[in-house]
Amino acid sequence: MLEQLEQEPHTRLPFFCSPHHQDSALWPVIGQLERAAGFARDDDAETKRDKLVGLLGPAADTGDISVLIELMSLPGGERFPPLDLNPQQRKSRTLAALTRQLEGLAQSLPILMIFEDLHWIDPTSRELLDLVLPRLERMRFS
């Protein structure tokens, strides 16, 4: 399948689940964001934040950027301060921000999400998949 898709325009998003991180919320998503943003081992926190902001793009909502910066355990600084949310609100806002990012990607190209070792997915990442998949299936590509 991957060989057939090699010639088709698409965005490939690899996610890696782990038995050691089944209790770490959104662990495969965090790893994918780190790879997509191009985090290097020797990047400091501000450099990582800037790379993440660059990945999310100029059209990203400031609140979405704030919750995703917090998800990545990065300092938001004055530009992206933490939002005053209780844990349930933070989770909902984070899942909504991730969903919007995926929808934005899917507007230009089909998305191929590959989950390695899905049987070890954490519950919050599973919840994100349950939210995202029906929405992406209904999207049209321009």
Image (cartoon, rainbow, N blue to C red):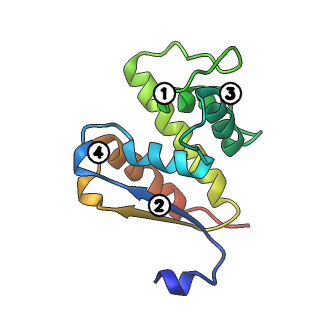
Say which label, 3 or 2, has the lower sequence index: 2
CA gap, disc 4 and disc 1: 18 Å
CA gap, disc 3 and disc 1: 16 Å
User: According to the image, label 2 marks what residue?
Assistant: 14
Mark 4 vs mark 1: in front: 1
Question: Which amino acid is tagged 3?
Answer: Thr
User: Which circle marks residue 73 in the picture?
Assistant: 1
User: According to the image, label 4 marks what residue?
Assistant: 122
Q: What element carries label 3?
A: helix
Question: Which amino acid is tagged 1?
Answer: Ser
**The C terminus lies in quadrant:** bottom right
CA gap, disc 2 and disc 4: 16 Å
Question: Which amino acid is tagged 2?
Answer: Pro
Question: Which amino acid is tagged 4?
Answer: Asp
Q: Do the residues labelled 2 and 1 touch (CB within 8 Å)?
A: no
Which residue is at 75% across, 40% downward? Answer: 59
Quarter of image, res 91: top left
Indicate left or right for 97 with 89 as reference. right
Against 81, is 36 above or below?
below
Which residue is at 38% across, 20% downward? Answer: 87
User: Which circle marks residue 62 in the picture?
Assistant: 3
CA gap, disc 3 and disc 2: 26 Å
